[in-house]
Image: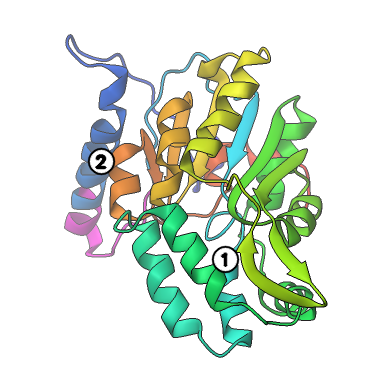
Amino acid sequence: MIDDGIAADIFFEPTDGVEATDCLEISRAIKEIAVSIARGGNGRELLLDVIVQPVAGREKKLLIADMDSTMITVECIDELADYAGIKPQIAEITERAMRGELDFEGALHGRVALLKGLPDSAIDQCREERVVIMGGAKALVRTMKARGATTLLVSGGFTRFTGPVAEEIGFDANVANVLEIADGALLGTVTRPIVDAARKRTELEAAIAGGIDRALTMAVGDGANDIPMIQGAGLGVAYHAKPKTREAAAAEIVHGDLSVLLYAQGISSSQWVAA
């Protein structure tokens, strides 16, 4: 038991023919069995997240994370668009891009172009009024850092959001796109090259090349542009994610918050660094 009534370890030996790539399917099978038993007992729905992984190396030394809808509860560009009066139009594009239905770079440039002329002051106002840190984010990052891990926030969003968010949560560093601004207003462009799916994977590979064992890395995100880094990490986690991202990940969180990733590393709440 990790935390009584909340989180537990169940150790088992895999049968012949079971590979590490089967972890997501095993976790879903376990979850289905547990939910079936719960319903048979009292009819109540069991909200259960299951992560199957090898015991060796379960505590990670690198966390690389997406920001929007992962470390915070909103999509910043959608909220920023609300200040321009075009949130529904931009939010639809965002949703399709995160589902992998649109090219990310094209969708980014198209959405930013629609924000041309928006006052620069709207960015800070949006961040202060709309950005909410995801549950468990501070405990996850601060606890991992206290135990010797490196933490990196990598976003297809914008530095004007990632900088303050990374500082508030406690990340070591952050990488994101830069909005181009002149005369106090957005120009409707971002600097190139952009931070996209490939760049997110590149940041992971750079950390590994710097001496962190791939098996000891964890990547978490929700959108299609997170898939390459999720697939490249020792533990790739889809967090309340889009269907394509869920299918690509080795693990998924469907019900809980980001503190599930501390339990997945065998770290009980008594060992967490307080937010």
Image quadrant in which you'd find residue 193: top right
Residue 267 visible somewhere in the drawing = no
Depth check: 72 or 17 in front?
A: 72
**What residue occupies the far bottom of the structure in this picture?**
85
Residue ID at (57%, 66%): 73
Whole-percent x and y of residue 190? 63, 59
The residue where tag 2 is placed is: 28
Disc 1: CA contacts within 10 A as few (<14), some (14-19) or many (>=20): some
Contact (CB < 8 A) between labels 1 and 2?
A: no
Residue ID at (79%, 32%): 146
| 38 drawn magenta | yes
Residue ID at (75%, 61%): 160
Whole-percent x and y of residue 179? 69, 62
| As drawn, 237 above or below 241 | above
Q: Amino acid at mark 2?
A: Arg
Depth check: 73 or 96 in front?
A: 96
What segment carries the magenta color? 37-48
Of the image marks 1 and 2, the number of the one nearer the N terminus: 2
The residue where tag 1 is placed is: 73
